Image (tube, coloured by chain):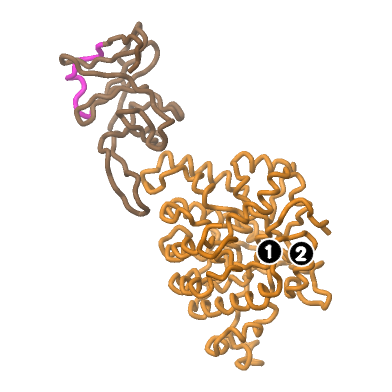
Chain colours: A brown, B orange
Amino acid sequence: MSSKIKHRLVVSPSSDLQEGQRLLIEVNGSEIGIIRAEGKCYAFRNACPHQGVQMIYGSVTGTMLPSDPHQYVYGQHNEIIRCPLHGWEFNLQTGKAVFSPSVSMIKYDVQEEDGSIVLYLDKSPERVVRKSFHCVL
Amino acid sequence: MAAKNEQHDIIDCDVHPVLTDFNELIPYLDESIQQYMNIGKFSKGALDKQNSGSFRFPASNYANPLPVPLRADAFTPAGGLPGSDPQFLAKDLFDRLGTKYGILNIGHGTMSAFHNVEVAAKYTSAVNDWLYEKWVKSDTRYRMTMEVTPLDPELAVKEIERIGKRPEIVGINMHCVNIPLGKRHYWPIYEIAEAYNLPIMLHPDTEGTGEYAAQFGVGPASTYMEWHTSLGLIGQRNVISLVCDGVFERFPNLRVNFLEYGFSWVAAVMWRMDKNWKALRHEVPWVKRLPSEYIRSNIRFGTQPIEEPNRPKDLVELIQMIQAEDLLLFCSDYPHWDGDELDRAFLHFPEDLKRKIYYENPLRSFRFGEAGERS
């Protein structure tokens, strides 16, 4: 755990983020996507570490687990978000790319507290803007 | 003519013996195949010239247009074809360069894509025996790859069981047909190759020739030049197939040596495959490492025909760029027209890289230890 002081930001009522829904906010100029999958909330920088494409449009999926040649084994259902451009897979919990633990999308600490979605940020949230987007997923 | 190399041990991974007359194979072929091939007492005489009147060996569809399609300085003193005399070849090539071992790869692989697999398999066995008896036994520096019939893995395995433990056999010359190398079709061959510690070796021959030949993606080449230049495409396709079908996960100790398909394209294949794997890994979940890592650990490439950029040192930079120092195998391709002279082809290579290419890499990649053991 980081010893740094975290700054609490109430984003929205929990009811604004139903299963499979997404939120997008801008905090101090950085966009943060928040999604709910299998009941859990995840928050991440709205930019893929590869070429910067907006992760808020990423598909939430499972994936094929490492296996013997020519054997398909499905797993991690709804634990993966894929970049909407090249399809890179990131673990929603850790932010790490499935293909390499040394590649990650930036994750944020998000909690549900008393019916609200709450972010804990390293820097004080001076400018917060709720942003609109159009995701058909 | 190249001066004798004094600095490095040399293993030449691609030396070609020439069969001057199919009748040389008669001692190694049973009568059924002699009859099928119309050789020896089964010759059809004048009918040989009739269209479909007698057996026609599946010679390459692409004739080399040069006046002398072999190196013209390698005819034997008696006027024999270059590559036809074991004693002369050893003197002309090995003595001249100081070669420690030369690996003989027979050059009639067009039979691998022939429509009658039974005949191809018996022909292949005969060629292996001819090569062993006539060539390998003639000089302690000779080693050989043994041919197999890629269209029939069961027969290929039997051939490997028959002769694959001979210590002079250092690899399996499989030839390229129209089944990509990663397919499970070949896995029985890979299984015994790994068990016998023999690398699979691929060398152009049958591409574009024979009913089961591999083609060049978009269609036949128009000329020999087009054919020869396009061989790298076959190499790329098979490297991609081996990695994506998980061959090296199933057979982690298998080595595959691509000779004469070039190697500068390896950079592009590595980069593209690695990039695609990051996105499409879930389609090949058995590929557990970066594709380029499998190439580096399990695949090797012959140096000949050396690629010649305008600035020769660019080739060294490319090798360093993709960490290919351990992937390259020296090949002279003697006595073919497109062979490389050791002292010129590697003029700009640093000495430590020469040492790897000339000796250390071939020593590790072909079987130079005990049969069935890692060298």
Q: Position of residue B178 (x, y in %)?
A: 49, 64
Q: Earlier in the sequence, mark 1 or mark 2?
A: 2
Which numbered disc covers residue B93? 2
Q: Secondary structure at mark 1?
A: strand
Which quadrant of the structure image shows residue A14?
top left
Q: Residue at x 45, y 57 (%)?
A: B182
Residue closer to the observer: B32 or A57: B32
Q: Position of residue B223 (x, y in %)?
A: 66, 63
Q: Is residue A11 magenta?
A: yes
- Visible residue check, residue B6: yes
**Residue at mark 2: chain:** B
Within-10-Å neighbours for mark 1: few <14, some 14–19, many 20+: many
Residue closer to the observer: A57 or A91: A91
Using residue A16 as the reference point, say whether residue B290 is left or right of it. right
- Visible residue check, residue B175: no
**Residue at mark 1: chain:** B
Q: Residue at x 46, y 62 (%)?
A: B195
Image position of A99 with respect to B112: above or below: above
Which numbered disc covers residue B245? none
Q: Position of residue A76 (x, y in %)?
A: 27, 38
Q: How many angstroms separate mark 1 from mark 2 (CA)?
A: 9 Å
Q: Is residue B222 magenta?
A: no
Amino acid carrying label 1: it is Gly
Amino acid carrying label 2: it is Leu
Image position of A3 with respect to B90: above or below: above
Q: Residue at x 37, y 22 (%)?
A: A45
Q: Which residues are magenta?
A: A10-20
Callout 1–callout 2 Cβ contact below 8 Å: yes
Which quadrant of the structure image shows residue B210?
bottom right
Using residue B41 as the reference point, say whether residue B87 is left or right of it. right
Q: Can you identify the residue that label 1 sits on?
A: B102
Within-10-Å neighbours for mark 2: few <14, some 14–19, many 20+: many
